Every structure is written in structure tokens, then in C-alpha cells.
Amino acid sequence: MRVILIGRDRGLSVAKRPDTTATPADEAEMPGSGKGRATPSRAEREAARKRPLVPADRKAAARDARGKNAEARERARLGMAAGDERYLTQRDKGPQRRYVRDYVDARYTVAEFLMPVMLIVVIFSFVQITALQYYAIIVLWVFFAIAIIDSIVMVSMMKRRIRDKFGAAERGLNWYAIMRALQFRMIRVPKPQVKRGQYPA
């Protein structure tokens, strides 16, 4: 702002002239301002600074937001099912975890049939035949023992392979492998990426 002092007999009066030059901040806000361009007027600068606080159509904006969120969730679901590292949880991330999943999915495990056997035993427990209930419990315990032995063999062979490939095994891989082996192959997440017998190198 330019200030002009005009002398008078009984003092000094100050006359202020409005400054129409744009500050660098104002020029930055206007997309059309800058070197080689005309300096925008005050009205143009004020119009450029105005932003709507809420969208004109709130229902349409909410609908668009819901659509985008649904698309993001679907991408995350498909990415997790496919084993994409970007969408995996911390529990499933890492090359060793991927190796464990591929190794478990490549073999037949006794543990994955444990839940159906337990369900059959529960059904037999409602049958009022003492001998049938007795043999059902025996079968369950025998199957349970075989599943434990098979899981021990699986973990032992898996850890040997991991040491040969990665040098050292991460913590928690044994439990990670056992929990995956307990699930039906068709419902495992991430979904199996290898066929039966297709062991990872």
C-alpha cells in the first residue's frame, strides 16, 4: 500500500491509495496468474478462493462414496484370495509364509478331515446305541492321534525345506502351517495357488 504525505499548515494528513497489485500468495491461488499473464482482479481472486463446504447433491455424493468403498473392498477381497501381498494381512505376508501355504496346499493332510469326523461322531452320540457310541469315540481318538502324527511329519519336512531355501525359519510358522492344514482346501484364505503334489521349489 502506497502512502502519500501531504503537508498542511496545522499538521500532516495521510492519504491512502488502494493497492491493486497481487501478492505472491494471491498469484499462486489463481491458475491464470503468473509471469507473462495479466494480474487478476480482486473479484477474480476472491472467486478463486471460494470453495463449497458441502456438495450440492449430498445423496449423489454419498452414493458415489459407497460405490467407491464397495469397489475398494472387492479389490481387497480378490487380492487377498489371490495371495497379492498388497492386500494380505500381516499374518500372511512374506515369502516364507507363502512357501508354507504352498507346501501345505500341495499335500494331503489328515487334519483337514478332522472336523468332518468330529461332526459324524457328534451325530452318532445322539443314537441310543451304546456300542455305536463307544466305537465312534474310539474312531475319533484314533483319527485324532493320526492327525497329530501327520502334522508333526508335515512340520518337520517343511522346516527342513525352509532352512535349505531361506537359511532360517521365521517364528510362528509351525502353528501357521497346522492351522491352515486344519481347514478344508476349498475354504482356505488366501486360496491355494498350487495343485496337489505341486510342491514349491
Image: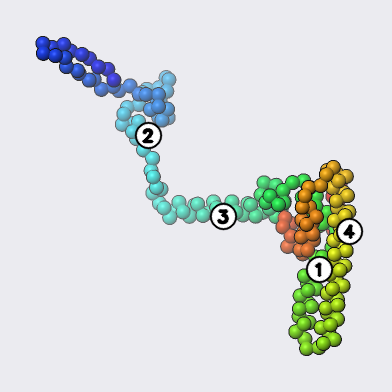
Say whether disc 2 or disc 3 marks the residue closer to the N-terminus. Answer: 2
Q: Quadrant of the N terminus?
A: top left
Q: Which amino acid does label 1 sit on?
A: Phe
Q: What residue type is labelled 3?
A: Ala
* Mark 2 residue crowding within 10 angstroms, few (<14) / some (14–19) / many (20+): few
The residue drawn where x is 72% and y is 55% is: 190
Report how far apart the C-alphas of labels 1 and 4 lie in the structure. Answer: 17 Å
Q: Which circle's residue, 3 or 4, is located before the other in the chain? A: 3
Callout 3: 10 Å neighbours few (<14), some, many (20+)? Answer: few
Residue 114: x %, y % from top left: 80, 69
Q: Which label sits in the foreground, 1 or 4?
A: 4
Q: Which amino acid does label 4 sit on?
A: Val
What residue is at 14 percent from the left and 14 percent from the top?
11
> What separation in Å lies between label 2 and label 4 (alpha carbons)?
71 Å
State the separation of the CA atoms marked 1 and 2: 67 Å
Instruction: Give the residue at mark 2.
Output: 48
Mark 1 vs 4: CB contact within 8 A? no
- Front residue of this view, candidates 78 and 164: 164
Q: What element carries label 4?
A: helix
User: Which mark is on residue 125?
Assistant: none
Residue for badge 1: 113
Foreground: disc 1 or disc 2: 1
**Residue located farthest toward the bottom when viewing the structure as drawn:** 128
Q: Where is residue 75 in the image (x, y as percent from the top left)?
A: 63, 51
Q: In this view, does 21 lie to the left or right of 92?
A: left
Q: How far apart are labels 3 and 1 at the CA level?
A: 35 Å
Q: Name the residue under label 4.
A: 153
Can you identify the residue that label 3 sits on? 70
Of the image marks 3 and 1, the number of the one nearer the N terminus: 3
